[in-house]
Image (cartoon, rainbow, N blue to C red):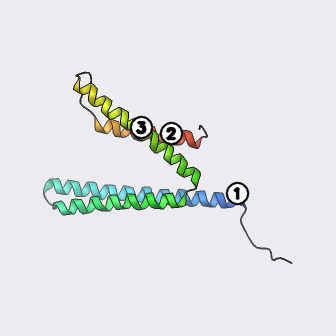
Amino acid sequence: MTDKTDTLSGEARLKSRRNSLWRFCAMGSGIAAVVGLVTGYAGGHYENGTLPAWGLFAAWLVAVASFAWFTWEYFRRVDELDVLDNLWCCLFSLYFYMVAFPSWWLFHDLGLAPEVNHVAIYLATLGIGAIVYIARKLGLR
């Protein structure tokens, strides 16, 4: 006779795993907000002359290390389909950037466009990535 154990069904395990991933992402977003605020605060103090350059570099290093750690942990926690969706998202974003930046630069040099707006290209690149990622998640492959 076998003992009855309290094991979760496949659907329950998937739900638990997804909830854990959402909690992890929420925690990462919270940490990113705090690190961003601290880095911005440090930048303001550097501009005022009350923080030496090494303090600003230290804040920047914490921000980059936090981002790298979150990325590493995120990819350890997701399955191969999530990785594939992220790869497509990054590929489309990179292709967009590789076309948008030199095109705008070319048209500016020819006098047909204003000076390159790096923030606009950065935000558009993030937007393209988000659109592709959402499309992949909706099954539009």
Q: Which of marks 3 and 2 is nearer the N terminus?
A: 3
Q: In this view, does 111 lie above or below 99?
A: above
- In the rendered image, which quarter is residue 9 located in? bottom right
Q: In the rendered image, which residue does mark 3 sit on?
A: 95
Q: In this view, does 52 lie above or below 100?
A: below
Q: Which mark is residue 89?
A: none
- Kindly identify the residue that appears in the image at 63 percent across and 61 percent down: 16
Q: Is residue 69 toward the left or the right of residue 48 in the image?
A: right
- Depth check, front residue: 20 or 109: 109
In the rendering, at what x and y percent does residue 58 appear? 25, 63
Q: Earlier in the sequence, mark 1 or mark 3?
A: 1
Determine the CA span between mark 1 and mark 2: 27 Å
Q: Is residue 52 toward the left or the right of residue 90 in the image?
A: left
Q: Residue most toward the right?
A: 1
Q: In the rendered image, which residue does mark 1 sit on?
A: 11
Dot 3: element:
helix
Amino acid type shown at disc 2: Val
